[in-house]
Amino acid sequence: MAIQMHIQNIQSFQLSLKTTLPFLPIITNKLFKLEKMATVTTQASAAIFRPCASRTRFLTGSSGKLNREVSFRPSTFSSYNSFKVEAKKGQWLPGLASPDYLDGSLPGDNGFDPLGLAEDPENLKWFIQAELVNGRWAMLGVAGMLLPEVFTSIGILNVPKWYDAGKSEYFASSSTLFVIEFILFHYVEIRRWQDIKNPGSVNQDPIFKNYSLPPNKCGYPGGIFNPLNFAPTEEAKEKELANGRLAMLAFLGFIVQHNVTGKGPFDNLLQHLSDPWHNTIIQTLSN
């Protein structure tokens, strides 16, 4: 009986094998296609979610200046194309052509010169240094206007506000201090002007002959003026100009703000935070 059942099982297996064999190549082919499709889908998904190096540099600005060329870079698979579109170099307003003399090679150059003031190369040379110096003075000025007011308000210092600084009593008369400062700054500014006209001509100290500044680019003297030995990289120059421009606007804003409200910037900020819906520039100007 057992032998007969075993023979029947063998016959059933042979019958099922005969039935399946004709379809085996079709099934194998289907499985191969499914495996290939899964591989392609996985690789395409990885390509979509993997940031390319050029896009990372564009977002982080690691080079100090934006990549401004337009480039299209297709990926391996035709079903997905990765590309980046960026503003052209020296273009401060999309669609507006920049002047030929502003080609984006200078730090902070975005092609903005609607009045054509920098068309003359000599004027451009002067404006570059003027913006650099005024931006540095503005950053010092804004810090000197804001920080004493903040520290006095929180009780760390007890000094007058910036608009009352001229009323304070100094160790000498205001006229004497003005004359001394005029002489000192006249000497410094004349040497700066000479360095703009003839770069490197004032590196040698006229009084202390043993001291001279290292070779440098105009506007970035180095030496004792750079005690921490920061390298004047393009990224650092861009940041300095951006902060200097912002400080010049802030300085102008502080003056206008005081003329309108009679208060300093920190006092105005505290007043606004005390009632944000009613203490705003709209209510101030309307009154």
Image (cartoon, helix red, strand yellow):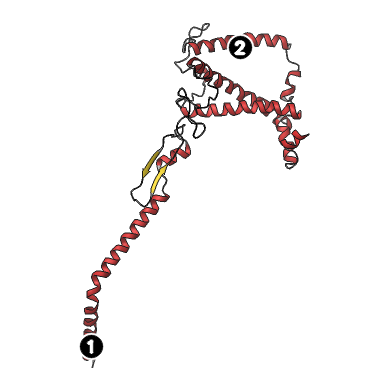
**Residue 243, visible in the rendered structure:** yes
The residue shown at (73%, 37%) is: 282
**Residue highlighted by disc 2:** 185
Residue 263 is situated, as x and y percent measured from the top left of the image, at 75, 29
Per the model, the C-alpha gap separating discs 1 and 2 is 115 Å
Query: Viewed as shown, does residue 140 lie left or right of 197?
Result: right
Q: Quadrant of the N terminus?
A: bottom left
Figure check: 8 above or below 136 = below
Q: Earlier in the sequence, mark 1 or mark 2?
A: 1
The residue shown at (68%, 11%) is: 178
Figure check: 128 above or below 22 = above
Type of residue at label 1? Answer: Gln
Question: Do the CB atoms of the residues marked 1 and 2 lie less than 8 Å apart?
Answer: no
Residue 202 is situated, as x and y percent measured from the top left of the image, at 49, 10
Dot 2 crowding, Cα within 10 Å, few <14, some 14–19, many 20+: few
**Residue highlighted by disc 1:** 8
Judged from the image, the secondary structure of the residue bearing numbered disc 1 is: helix
Judged from the image, the secondary structure of the residue bearing numbered disc 2 is: helix
**Residue 157, visible in the rendered structure:** no
Figure check: 5 above or below 41 = below
Q: Quadrant of the C terminus?
A: top right
- Nearest the viewer among 97 and 155 is 97
